[in-house]
Structures are given as C-alpha cells and as structure tokens.
Image: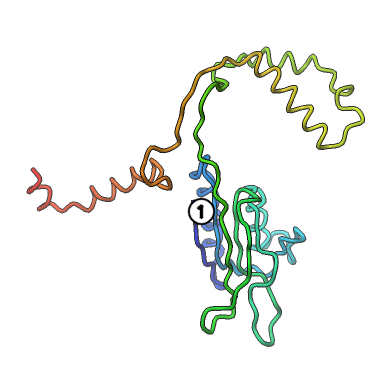
Amino acid sequence: MVGICYRSTASEQANNHQLLHLFEEAATLAGKSHVLIMGDFNYPEINYGAFEVHGPHNSEAASFFDATQDLFLYQHVQDYTRFRMGQNLSVLDYIFTDEENLIDNLTHQVPVGKSDHCCLQFYILQTTENIFFGNKLNYHKGNYAEILKDLGDIDWDNSLEGKDTEEMSEVIRDLIMVTSEKNVPIKNDKHTVSKHKDKWISRRTIKEIKKRETACITPRQKKLSA
C-alpha cells in the first residue's frame, strides 16, 4: 500500500488528527502486504535519528512522532531535505515503511524548478510473494491449554541464565515452537495471496471499484442494459 501526503504548515489540529487516523487505517488495511507512506509533513521539531521531539510532549509534532512509533513504522530519511537561504536546515520530508530493509539506495537529488526541497530517490526492494506449499500448523485447532502447561513447566531462570538478549530470544522462540509442533495439528496447504493479474490490487480494492462502477451507471444505462 502506497500513500503520498502533504501536511501544510497551516494545518489545523482536526486535520492533523485525521492524518494520524489515515496512518492507522493504512497499516490495518495493508494486512500482510507492506506499507509505504511518503511526503512533506512539515515537522521540523522531530528528530527521528535521535528519537526525540523538540517541544512540549503534548504538541502536534509529538503526537505525530508517537503515532508513527506506536504503528512500528520506520522513517528512512535522516539527512536534511529543505534548504533555504537565511533559514535553518531541516528534515521535513519522510519515507515510512513497516519493514526496515524495504528501502535501499536512498539519495538526495537536486530540487525540481525553484523548490527548496530536494528530491528523494530510492529503491523499493522486491519481497518474496506469499505463496506457501506443503505442511503448515493449523493454529485454529491448537491445544492452547496444553501449550500453556508446557510453557509453565519450563525452568525459565535456568534456561535463560547467562544469555544475552538475542540468545534469550532464540531460546524462547525455540521452546515455543517445540510445544506448538506438539500441540497444533498439521494441515496441508497451498495458498496464493492473489490470483489477480495485477498483484497490487487487493480483493477489497476490486470490490470498491465494482461499487464505484455500479454507482456511476445512469438511469438511462440501466434501462438500456435491461
């Protein structure tokens, strides 16, 4: 899902809140797909590189920063994007994705015309198509009571003793997988995310397109088709 935004410096609070709502909707509607949101957001107070906002904790800039963090979005632009004589350099243009390694070769190019914003050029890395073959765990029919019992019987202090964060994460993941494979049945599955010619069109989008086409039919067209 790709979104392009422009937030004016004169944007009112209600509009700012609506923008955050759109971010949440994009993250939700994307489902298993990826999200790419970019544009000029005009928040010079935010420093994503240092994870800080210069100003009150309840400011519009702070609310925007907190919202993008709560949605686990990565902001890829770190260098200045706006240059104007007599004014401070600033990062006003952002590129958000839901995966850190989705963007590559981000470069700052010369502005278009008389704009004081540089152009951002980058590559979106192609991701593996979500096609699954073979056996998968059928989590809907898992015995979660038994899974909780197995996890409760583990001596976690002893299992995690002396390990760093990454090592502990691996131990926890492996133990959960062991009990899951024992208590969750296997199903043979072959599933393709989309059978449509255009992979970027979701079923939801196609449904909305059909609704739009139906709404655009005039009474005369309905009579002729009848």
Q: How is the image coloured?
A: rainbow
Choose top left, top right, bottom left or bottom right for residue 185: top right
Mark 1 is surrounded, within 10 Å at the Cα level, by few (under 14), some (14 to 19) or many (20 or more) other residues, namely: few
The number of numbered discs placed on residues in the rendered structure image is 1
Q: Is residue 80 above or below residue 164?
A: below
Residue drawn at (56%, 22%) of the image: 136
- Residue 213 location (% of width, % of height): 25, 50
**Quarter of the image holding residue 96?**
bottom right
Farthest-out residue, right: 162
Front residue of 90/190: it is 190
In the image, taking residue 31 as reference, residue 181 lies left or right, namely: right
Q: Residue at x 36, y 41 (%)?
A: 196
Give the amino acid at mark 1.
Leu
- Expressed as whole percent of the image width and height from the top left, the position of residue 202 reads 41, 43
Percent from the top left, x then y, of residue 204? 39, 42
Residue appearing at x 8%, y 43% in the figure: 226
174 relative to 7 in the view: left or right: right
Label 1 secondary element: helix
- The residue pinned by badge 1 equals 22
Q: Nearer the viewer, residue 214 or 162?
A: 162
137 shown above or below 44 = above
Relative to 4, 168 lies left or right: right
Question: Picture coordinates of residue 47 (x, y %)?
Answer: 72, 64
Residue at image point 53% right, 58% down: 19
In the rendered image, the residue lying farthest to the bottom is 86
